[in-house]
Amino acid sequence: MIIINDIIVSVSLLASDMTKMAEEIRRCENAGVDWIHYDVMDGHFVEQISYGTQILKSVRKCTDRPLDVHLMVERPDQQAEYFAEAGADIIDIHIESPCDTAACLKRIREMGKSPALAIKPKTPIEEAYPYLPLCDMVLVMTVEPGYGGQGFIAEMTAKVKSLREYADNNGFPSLNIQVDGGINEKTGAQAKRAGANVFVAGTGLFNANDMKAVNSALKGTL
């Protein structure tokens, strides 16, 4: 179930020890993390290659947490159905991908999944506005997609603020706004003040001595 406009911490599996996937997921659950963020990279839309549907099926068996699948792929319209079948709950597609964005978002909804729109740092946030009727969430990337462990781009808070103001003033007050990239207690607080409510953290959680404390700090300071 997607929680609208609540504070949500989503852990990025890209930063986990993939030789111990089930243990890592259990550690996230014990820490109180709300969602599992699953980054799919195809080596074309972004330079890196990550993992696909077979790994997602295994992840699905390990947890009942919502699985948020971020498709950093050239043709999400050709991939979304496979990831829906593999267990995704939320599917994020990039506005920059060369496909019919509206049709793809509608198809995700038809499959009973939650559609989300992702946007790169250099893309004007105004390009997302026409798609808000089709989305449950907009993912504002706070780093360039494709690599974990990057630093937060502070200028992206202005995009979050503009999006939240537009959503609130145009009939979409329940829109989830997600930020991903360089999220920690400090940068998360900045994004929260701008209007974000879903926070993806990878290295900040997995590399912590006490993941539960970091999760609690994120929720407490955001």
Image (tube, grey):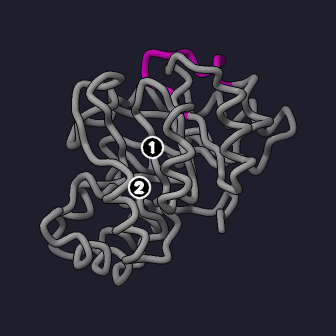
* Quarter of the figure with the N terminus: bottom right
Q: Is residue 43 above or below residue 168?
A: above
- Residue assigned mark 1: 70
Q: Nearer the viewer, residue 75 or 134?
A: 75
Would residue 75 be found to the left or right of residue 26 on screen?
Answer: right
Q: Is residue 131 above or below residue 202?
A: above
Where is residue 211? Give x, y as percent. 26, 73
Q: Secondary structure beneath disc 1?
A: strand
- Residue farthest right in this picture: 171
Highlighted magenta segment, given as a residue range: 118-128
**171 falls in the magenta region:** no
Where is residue 215? Give x, y as percent. 37, 69
The kind of residue tagged 1 is His
Disc ID at residue 179: none
Name the image quarter holding residue 169. top right
Q: Secondary structure beneath disc 2?
A: strand
Name the image quarter holding residue 95. top right
Residue at 42% in and 62% down: 36
Q: Is residue 205 above or below residue 53?
A: below
User: Do callouts 2 and 1 mark residues in contact (Cβ within 8 Å)?
Assistant: yes
Alpha carbon distance from label 2 to label 1: 7 Å
Where is residue 133? Give x, y as percent. 80, 36
Residue at 36% in and 60% down: 11
- Residue assigned mark 2: 37
Q: Nearer the viewer, residue 141 or 216?
A: 141
Residue 185 in sight = no
Where is residue 44? Give x, y as percent. 31, 22
- Tell which circle, 2 or 1, labels the residue nearer the N-terminal end: 2
Q: Nearer the viewer, residue 127 or 195?
A: 127
Residue 68 in sight = yes
